[in-house]
């Protein structure tokens, strides 16, 4: 276990500049926590927002109270979760991270430890399509570089230029210092990072939806306590013991930092619900209990901050696993007003389950001996549904959003290379392998490789501007997460899982499929777009990552190389006049999708030619 210590809280001014209708709507409707003084049920509260127009965005990671439980956890700007950051494609984000921990609260890593170094930290922008390079590579500022090691009492300046072609979506930020990630991020130091929809990107029915933000987190206090004990930190020390003595939950599920909060919803009104799920190892399936009179309709718009090829998609449940995000069109109604509906969490087998043992067979396993909680079906949030004065919800148009080229459909293109990636456990070893080869990223192996994660040998090298295919094993028990670039599902044993929640053709940056077996393989493809440098890949069961289940791919070639076929996508700022999505009636959606996916044939020829050219040069 790793962990953090105390720090001063940075309090942001309540005055927020509203610079357009989208942000005004977000400020009016956002349901984010403003502080973490209590975890008792109550009205869901606002978190507050940080905008690039505010100047340098300052976040401070420190030890903060875990509600009224009587112990401290890790938080951002004095709260759990931290404030949300909201940006536009093309904006420059200057992010200053302060380490408010105590240098003496924790022990340095040694070869025998997995959870340590908790007095150090950094910040990762999970899901953003950004460069991993930074000062170490000769730049003036750090980018999304998780090898940054920020000491207690110090600050570091990150600068991110959000690509002007970045797809709008829901992402999040969290600490990612190796061997301290599970304690810091799993303890609550995290927050939303939202890229806004540009004007005209979606039909009016979607653009005008009021937004609701639900940062859902589970906190296995038994696991956190065990990790804190190994890391020798006072933060989260005795957390489970203290909670049990007070008769409080040792495995609380929070929404915006509160247990069982309530939210008011006008009936028959579509809301866009942005969800981030943060957990050390647990996975949930969210459903709506209508036994109290309220019924809700859920339609999926995006997963992991990436719009579906065609929206909306009817769903009956929301599948969440560590690192997952979902954007849902959500509307509720009553037979008689007012009424309530309860959002319930139902644990999902696999992915570590509650005690980390999962159902993953040979490649399964969760937190090994760490953590042993009794997960049962539980209520996490109450929706108070009031008469919205609307007889029925508006009909949502079937629509295919325009896609930036790093998210072009690559199912029919030629690939520049392929290989097998394994998420493997066994005999106490946690590792990511490529074609069966690869070491566990333990502290001992890091020392043997030069003593620095920056010197860790890459599993394989990929050229920017090319597409690669990966056959993944172990994705039934380990959430697979890539930094820098998202990936597309191109093959599964079945065409869909989760009653259609997961389908071939969908994009993710983090993926867990508990319905496949340990013997099954899932094929994904990645467009290695634009950025050279280190691309980390790891299991997002954060304890597994800290225990060594992480590796990297070296992105080489020419910085800025992109997908060569722009006939179905855009590589510059979204232009509503030229980059329009497609509206369909239900009856012609299937045919229209086939037409849209025919164009990548040209890219197949271009990619094959590029691969031959590279082979000639290498010879």
Image (cartoon, rainbow, N blue to C red):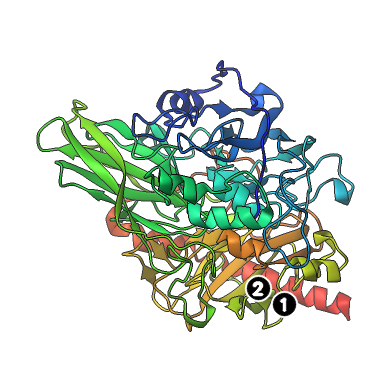
Q: For mark 1, what is the residue?
A: 438
Q: Position of residue 325 (x, y in %)?
A: 48, 50
The answer to whether residue 489 is above or below residue 68 is: below
Taking depth in this image into account, of 7 and 387 the one nearest to the observer is 7
From the viewer's perspective, tell me whether residue 502 is left or right of residue 113.
left
From the viewer's perspective, tell me whether residue 298 is left or right of residue 310.
left
The answer to whether residue 553 is above or below residue 426 is: above
The answer to whether residue 383 is above or below residue 120 is: above
User: Quadrant location of residue 553?
Assistant: bottom right
Taking depth in this image into account, of 324 and 563 the one nearest to the observer is 324
Q: Is residue 498 visible?
A: yes
Q: Is residue 599 visible?
A: no
Cα separation, mark 1 vs mark 2, equals 7 Å
Q: Position of residue 593 (x, y in %)?
A: 42, 61
Q: Residues within 10 Å of mark 1 (few under 14, many from 20)?
A: some
Secondary element under disc 1, as helix, strand or loop, is loop
Decide which of tag 1 and tag 2 comes sooner along the chain: 2
Residue drawn at 64 percent across, 68 percent down: 549
Q: For mark 2, what is the residue?
A: 431
Mark 1 vs 2: CB contact within 8 A: yes
Residue drawn at 47 percent across, 60 percent down: 596
From the viewer's perspective, tell me whether residue 470 is left or right of residue 321.
right
Residue drawn at 60 percent across, 57 percent down: 227
Q: Which numbered dot is residue 480?
A: none
Taking depth in this image into account, of 425 and 491 the one nearest to the observer is 425
The answer to whether residue 618 is above or below residue 195 is: below
Q: Position of residue 40 (x, y in %)?
A: 37, 34
From the viewer's perspective, tell me whether residue 600 is left or right of residue 266.
right
């Amino acid at each position: 276990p790793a962990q953090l210590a105390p720090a001063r809280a940075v309090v942001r001014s309540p005055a927020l500049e509203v610079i357009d209708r989208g942000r005004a709507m977000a400020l009016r409707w956002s349901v984010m926590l403003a502080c973490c003084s209590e975890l008792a049920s109550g009205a869901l509260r606002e978190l507050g927002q940080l905008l690039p127009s505010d100047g340098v965005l300052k976040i401070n990671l420190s030890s903060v109270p875990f509600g009224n439980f009587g112990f401290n956890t890790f938080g951002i700007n004095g709260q759990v979760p931290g404030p949300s950051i909201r940006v536009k494609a093309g904006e420059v984000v200057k992010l200053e991270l302060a380490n408010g921990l105590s240098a003496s609260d924790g022990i340095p890593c040694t070869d025998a430890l997995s959870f340590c170094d908790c007095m150090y930290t950094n910040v990762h922008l999970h899901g953003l399509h950004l460069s991993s390079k930074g000062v170490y590579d000769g730049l003036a500022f750090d980018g999304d570089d998780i090898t940054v090691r920020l000491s207690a009492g110090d600050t570091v300046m990150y600068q991110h230029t959000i690509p002007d072609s970045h797809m709008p979506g829901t992402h999040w930020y969290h600490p990612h210092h190796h061997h301290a990630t599970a304690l810091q991020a799993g303890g609550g130091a995290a927050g939303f990072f939202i890229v806004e929809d540009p004007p005209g990107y979606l039909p009016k029915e979607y653009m005008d939806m009021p937004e609701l933000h639900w940062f859902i987190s589970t906190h296995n206090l038994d696991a956190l306590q065990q990790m804190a004990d190994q890391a020798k930190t006072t933060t989260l020390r005795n957390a489970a013991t203290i909670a049990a003595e007070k008769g409080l939950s040792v495995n609380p599920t929070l929404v915006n930092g509160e247990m069982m909060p309530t939210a008011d919803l006008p009936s028959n009104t579509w809301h866009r619900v942005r969800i981030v799920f943060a957990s050390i190892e647990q996975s949930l399936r969210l459903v709506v209990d209508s036994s109290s009179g309220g019924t809700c309709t859920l339609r999926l718009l995006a997963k992991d901050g990436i719009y579906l090829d065609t929206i909306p998609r009817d769903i009956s449940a929301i599948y969440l696993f560590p690192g997952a995000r979902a954007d849902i069109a959500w509307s509720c109604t009553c037979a008689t007003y007012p009424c309530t509906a309860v959002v319930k969490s139902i644990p999902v087998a696999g992915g570590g389950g509650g005690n980390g043992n999962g159902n993953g067979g040979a490649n399964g396993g969760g937190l090994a001996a760490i953590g042993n909680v009794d997960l049962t079906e539980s209520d996490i949030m109450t929706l108070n549904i009031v008469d919205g004065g609307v007889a029925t919800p508006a009909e949502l148009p079937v629509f295919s959003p325009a896609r930036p080229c790093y998210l072009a459909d690559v199912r029919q293109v030629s690939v520049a290379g392929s290989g097998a990636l394994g998420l493997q456990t066994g005999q106490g070893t946690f590792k990511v392998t490529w074609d069966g080869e690869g070491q566990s990223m333990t502290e001992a192996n890091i020392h043997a490789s030069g003593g620095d994660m920056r010197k860790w040998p890459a599993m394989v090298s990929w050229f920017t501007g090319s597409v690669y295919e990966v056959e993944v094993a172990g994705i039934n028990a380990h959430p697979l997460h890539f930094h820098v670039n998202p990936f597309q599902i191109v093959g599964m044993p079945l065409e869909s899982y989760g009653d259609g929640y997961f389908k071939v053709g969908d994009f993710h940056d983090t993926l867990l499929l508990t319905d496949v077996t340990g013997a099954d393989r899932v094929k994904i493809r990645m467009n290695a777009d634009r950025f050279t440098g280190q691309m980390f890949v790891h299991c997002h069961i954060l304890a597994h990552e800290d225990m060594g289940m992480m590796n990297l791919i070296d992105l080489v070639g020419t910085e800025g190389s992109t997908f060569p076929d722009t006939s179905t996508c855009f590589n510059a700022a979204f232009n509503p006049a030229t980059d329009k999505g497609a509206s369909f009636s239900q009856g012609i959606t299937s045919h229209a999708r086939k037409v849209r996916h025919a164009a990548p044939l040209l890219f197949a020829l271009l990619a094959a030619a590029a691969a031959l050219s590279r082979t000639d040069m290498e010879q």
